[in-house]
Image (cartoon, rainbow, N blue to C red):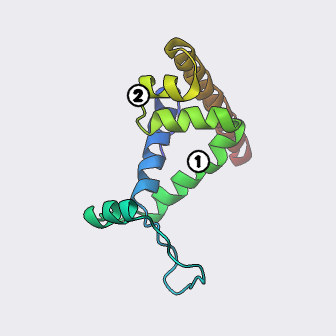
Amino acid sequence: MKPIKNIADVEEEIKKALIIIKHMPTDGPKKVRSHWPMCLSEEVEELVSSRPIKYTKILPEEIDDMDEVLGDWMKCLDYNERNLVIMRCSGYSWKVLTAKLNFARSTLHSKYVFYLKKILRHVLNKQNENKKEVR
């Protein structure tokens, strides 16, 4: 992962992590059995069967970066803050976010930028601690 310098870098890394999650297989380990029946509604079955599943080769370094971004970076935010950041980085429009979260667009945007700055401070503190440890 490249060094983080501003909130645009934070936003870019979060988007990359979300893309990696989206491309990972969701069916779990192959040799593990579940005794729960697979119950899907007809609509969901049709939707799932009509779309071809495309997986891309994900490198272990990318998974490590994703774990750091979504695991370590997001710890500095509470649930609602994380929710807004992840929804916006996932591609939700401001119009949809205003309807879901019941805030004005300008309020949501200022909160979003504030949360990205909060993550940036957390990351920069970690980077500075790592530099001190190396010396």
Question: Which residue sits furthest front?
Answer: 42
Label 1, residues with CA under 10 Å away: few <14, some 14-19, many ≥20: some
In the figure, is residue 35 to the left or right of 90?
Answer: right
The image position of residue 114, as x and y in percent, is 61, 21
First in sequence, mark 2 or 1: give its number.
Answer: 1
Q: Which residue is mark 2?
A: 93
Q: 26 and 59: which one is in front?
A: 26
In the figure, is residue 39 to the left or right of 93?
Answer: right
Number of numbered labels in the structure image: 2
The image position of residue 2, as x and y in percent, is 47, 42
The image position of residue 127, as x and y in percent, is 64, 39
Amino acid carrying mark 2 in the image: Ser
Quadrant of residue 81 within the rendered picture: top right
Residue 70 - label: 1
Label 2, residues with CA under 10 Å away: few <14, some 14-19, many ≥20: few
User: Please, what secondary structure does the residue beneath circle 1 have?
Assistant: helix
